[in-house]
Amino acid sequence: MENGVLVDSSVFIHLLRRGLDPVDALREEFGTLDIVTCGAVKIEVLRGMKTPKARAHMESFLSVCQFVPSNNALWDAAIDLAWSMDRAGQVIPATDILIAVSAQRVGASVLTLDQHFAMIPRLGMAKVPDSWR
């Protein structure tokens, strides 16, 4: 996790379902400065927040994380990855492709509970703490 960890929405959802505050859990485990996010994760996480207060809390946290901006180069990398994976018979959701190329762009590992990410070549994976399972 040399350049941080990009936390997939599956981790946020899992922690919320367990009754844990993802903000507290992630800060405790990684520290805010090591957490990376991107637009795909922000939309997946924030759209699921139940109340305006919960959304504001999560939005505040995500706003201080390192953000990987999307631009034409990121989209082109996502298109190339999706195209090559599809041709190899490994079709995964476009949002997962965007999250993966965002992590690769900054050299971050991905923290996820989603098995799709294991199929992506040259993607660093962070281990989900046992205490969160």
Image (cartoon, rainbow, N blue to C red):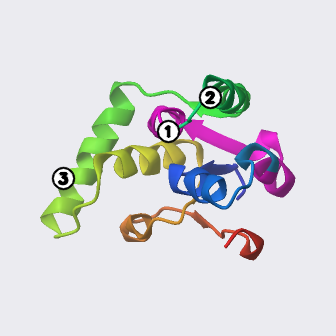
Pinpoint residue 17: horizontal percent, then vertical percent. Answer: 61, 57
Say if 111 sits above or below 53 in the image: below
Mark closer to the chain start, 3 or 2: 2
Instruction: Please tell me in which quadrant of the rendered image residue 62 appears.
Output: top right
- Residue 108 in sight in this render: no
Foreground pick, 38 / 57: 57
Point 43% across, 28% down: residue? 70
Callout 1 secondary element: loop
Instruction: Please tell me in which quadrant of the rendered image residue 14 appears.
Output: bottom right
Distance Cα–Cα, label 3 vs label 2: 34 Å
Q: Which mark is residue 55?
A: 2
Q: Are marks 1 and 2 in contact (CB under 8 Å)?
A: no
Point 66% across, 68% down: residue? 128
For badge 3, the amino acid type reads Trp
Foreground pick, 65 / 2: 65
The residue labelled by disc 3 is: 83
The residue labelled by disc 1 is: 48
Point 51% across, 27% down: residue? 69
Mark closer to the chain start, 1 or 2: 1
Say if 35 sits above or below 59 in the image: below
> What is the crowding at mark 1: few (fewer than 14 residues within 10 Å), some, or many (at least 20)?
few
Front tag of 3 and 2:
2
Callout 3 secondary element: helix
For badge 2, the amino acid type reads Arg
Would residue 26 be found to the left or right of residue 67 on screen? right
Q: Which residues are magenta?
A: 25-48
Foreground pick, 3 / 10: 10
Point 28% across, 59% down: residue? 92
- In magenta segment, residue 53: no
Pinpoint residue 118: horizontal percent, then vertical percent. Answer: 43, 70
> What is the crowding at mark 2: few (fewer than 14 residues within 10 Å), some, or many (at least 20)?
some
Foreground pick, 6 / 60: 60
